[in-house]
Amino acid sequence: MRLFSPDFAWQYFKEKADLYRKYGYDILEERRRFLSWLERLPEPVLEIGTGRGYFTLVLGMQGYNVISIDPDFEAVEFAKSLLSSQGEFVNVDLLIGSGDSIPLPNRSVGSVVMFNLWHHLEDVDKLISEIGRVIRPGGTLAVVDFSQAGFDLVDKIHQEVYGKSHLVVRQGFDDLISSFTEARIYRYKTDFEEGVCLIL
């Protein structure tokens, strides 16, 4: 079990942000841009895939009531430290949990969001079922992932840092869209990201 100090988490984030910025990608700005494209999300907002907490941080800074889940204990601990480095976020709950079995009651969230998680997922059927269970009728499902240019950029960075390609399991959102046939669908695109917003 590894714990992280807020100073370590912020320094790690700054180094990662500087590396991405060298290639023209601003980690926080991409997340802010996506949120500004969306209308104000119904709350609470469930984030699936906390990762290191970059999107969680932006959600918290914009005042959203957030529940963020990730199955990786160290990722959640890092995200807690990153948020602590920027102040106290009483509006953010970070939980250990998986999208395959979301640890929340039925119809308990107003929105579900995922940022740059989709390409990691192999089987999304259970995840889609769980989203349908926890989100309220009329809720918002917003999913963003790298565009082809974004994947090319991430691959360059992975080659530079790790000496290997970045693993991409899936691209596109067709299976997600086809699972919510009654939803209103809006599409999102920037140089490095693309996504969908579904009003369920």
Image: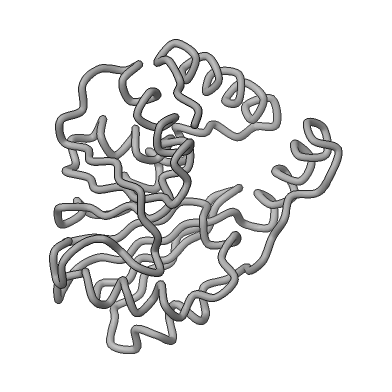
* Residue 110 figure quarter: bottom left
* Residue 100 figure quarter: bottom left
- In this picture the colour scheme is one colour
Q: Which is more toward the observer, 85 or 31?
A: 85
Q: Which is more toward the observer, 167 or 138?
A: 167
Q: Residue furthest top?
A: 7
Instruction: Give the vertical position of 51 relative to 26 (above or below).
Output: below
Give the quarter of the figure containing the C terminus.
bottom left
Left or right: residue 198 compared with residue 26: left
Left or right: residue 75 compared with residue 99: right
Residue occupying the point 28% across, 87% down: 182
Q: Position of residue 39 (x, y in %)?
A: 23, 54
Q: Position of residue 165 (x, y in %)?
A: 80, 49
Residue occupying the point 53% across, 56% down: 145
Residue occupying the point 35% across, 61% down: 142
Instruction: Give the vertical position of 27 relative to 42 (above or below).
Output: above
Residue occupying the point 16% across, 36% down: 91
Left or right: residue 195 compared with residue 19: left
Q: Residue furthest front?
A: 1
Q: Which is more toward the observer, 114 or 153?
A: 114
Left or right: residue 63 compared with residue 179: left
Q: Position of residue 114 (x, y in %)?
A: 41, 56
Q: Position of residue 25 (x, y in %)?
A: 60, 34
Instruction: Give the vertical position of 120 relative to 80 (above or below).
Output: below
Q: How many marks?
A: 0
